Image (tube, rainbow, N blue to C red):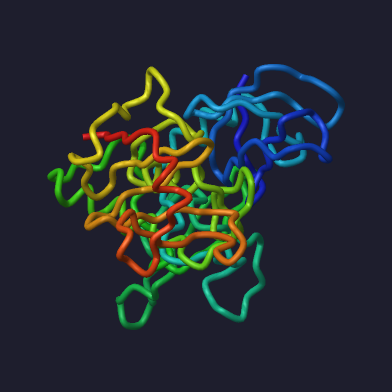
Amino acid sequence: MKAIVNAPICPLMSQPRHDCELADEALFGMALEVLEETTPGYWKVRTHYRYEGYAPVNCLVIGDQAARQWEALPKKVVLHKNTCDVMASPKVQSWPLVTLPMGAIVAVPAAPETAPESGEPTGWQRVSLPDGREGYMRSSWLDTYYDTPVDLPERELRQRLVDTAKLFVRTHYRWGGKTPLGVDCSGLVSMSYLLNGIIIWRDASIREGFPIHTIELKDAKAGDLLFFPGHVAMYMGDGQYIHSTGKAGSDGVDCNSLCPEAPNYRADLKEKLNGVGSYF
């Protein structure tokens, strides 16, 4: 059985209760596979990137028919705002139906609305939500939803991955998080890839069956991944990398260097570097 996330952020817990470790977050509009109906209020689910956790049932629209209908609709993804409102009507004076984070997915059953007098787009996009409601979002907040890897030359794709990771700058560290409301190290890099249609393993390791393979540090280029014990970062080139770190003083997404002469050098990480991975 399938389910669609109908909450802005659906926590995927490590156990079927709220007072335990957050394993991951499933975002609005994501399709999940229901694995087990566990304790009342929580069901065990698997994401399309093969990560498992326990989801609160009240965050889901459950049922194969509803999932099929949702998956058949064309989609857009929230990309150009950290958070944004779905409004009841196409005007700023309306009221929000739901507030969505970057990475949330909406269906777009219609072209942008057109102003009746001028014939020019008003800048609003009518959207459908998993529970059947409809609302409006600014078109500029949305971008292409990729469920397969974006088709770009390698150099451009590498830079696009880095630019996507930079969208999370100023985000605080949240264990298991993957939005601008809080993100952990693997959430940052996996979302940067996922927003470009590439599925990599959610945790800070290279996992068989996913498209990251081991390379030498000397061969690392922008968009490749640096692995440390329990930690992962994205290489940006010239010795620089971006990561989400819980270290006091950083407390979230930060940029550091592998070069000892750089002012943002972190010796504690360089000394523990134990692997480099690449999609390319």
Quarter of the view holding residue 139: bottom left
- Residue 235 seen from this side: yes
Q: How many marks?
A: 0
238, 261: nearer the viewer: 261
Q: Residue at x 40, y 41 (%)?
A: 194
From the viewer's perspective, is 277 left or right of 194? left
97, 16: nearer the viewer: 16
Image vertical order of residue 185 relative to residue 113, above or below: above
Residue furthest out toward the right: 40
Image vertical order of residue 62 relative to residue 131, above or below: above
Q: Residue at x 51, y 44 (%)?
A: 187
From the viewer's perspective, is 54 left or right of 156? right
In the rendering, at what x and y percent does residue 168 appear? 46, 60
In the rendering, at what x and y percent does residue 274 appear? 39, 34
Q: Residue at x 58, y 66 (%)?
A: 249
From the viewer's perspective, is 229 left or right of 55? left
- Residue 75 seen from this side: no
Q: Residue at x 85, y 23 (%)?
A: 39
